[in-house]
Image (cartoon, helix red, strand yellow):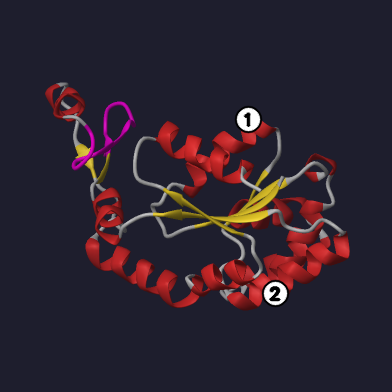
Amino acid sequence: MRIVLLGAPGCGKGTQAKKLMADKNIPQISTGDMLREAVAHGTRFGQQAKLTIDSGNLVPDEVVLGIISERLRRPDAADGFILDGFPRTERQALDLEELLDQLETPLDAAVLLDIDFEILMKRLTGRRTCSLTGQLLNIHFSSQEELDACTNAGGELIQREDDNEKTITSRLDVYHARTEPLIEFFSSRGQLKIVDAVGSVDEVYERLLEALQEG
């Protein structure tokens, strides 16, 4: 199973990827994790990435693609992989397509975790962390009992600085402009599957499995 997970920030890509990884015994390949690992291990492309990062610049697409190529050649990816966070643009999607053709490991599907903008805003702006337990909560979706359990014990519900409406709106605007065109890209290749991402983690996961089994 070789898939790309698509979706806006807050749609649950990371959570669903981890469940799929454990269930199917295939690696979740996250761009950020890969970059850090390649830099730490001093691989060929990791060294190039480090030079770019140290100079304060964004890592070029060709370096990211090189790191992905190194990662996909490792034994644990022989039976499949879940790409999370790449591609983000149509250019990257074309480069990935070419790489997978070279490796003779074509993509099985691109799965879009689809969710309404208003729900995303509530998910992201409502996130809180209990200062006592570190538990992740949400002022819109967690039960009042869960929220009270933290505050009644003397804890605080802490919001991350970047979980504000202005920052999140900016992130979603970037997603709409750069990443949404990937929906048409994969659809035109007959690879797109759309999964309703509203509901519990387990409910969304069941829909994801059903979508992957289709065809």
Residue underneath mark 2 = 94
Residue at 61% across / 66% down in the picture?
Answer: 87
Q: Is residue 89 left or right of residue 175?
A: right
Q: Is residue 131 left or right of residue 3?
A: left
Which residues, given as a range, are shown in magenta? 129-142
Query: 94 or 37, which lies in front?
Result: 94
In the picture shown, does residue 91 fall above or below 66? below
Query: 209 or 181, which lies in front?
Result: 209
Residue at 77% across / 66% down in the picture?
Answer: 66
Q: Is residue 160 left or right of residue 32?
A: left
Which quadrant, please, contains the N terminus? top right
State the image coordinates of residue 139 (x, y, percent, origin top left). Answer: 19, 41
Query: What amino acid type is highlighted by mark number 1?
Result: Asp
In the picture shown, does residue 181 fall above or below 150? below
State the image coordinates of residue 11 (x, y, percent, origin top left). Answer: 41, 51
Residue underneath mark 1 = 23
- Give the class, few, some or many, for how many residues have Cα within 10 Å of label 1's Cα (few <14, many ≥20): few
* Mark 2 secondary-structure assignment: helix
State the image coordinates of residue 96 (x, y, percent, origin top left). Answer: 72, 67
Residue at 64% across / 60% down in the picture?
Answer: 191
Query: 173 or 198, which lies in front?
Result: 198
Q: CA distance from mark 2 to mark 1?
A: 29 Å
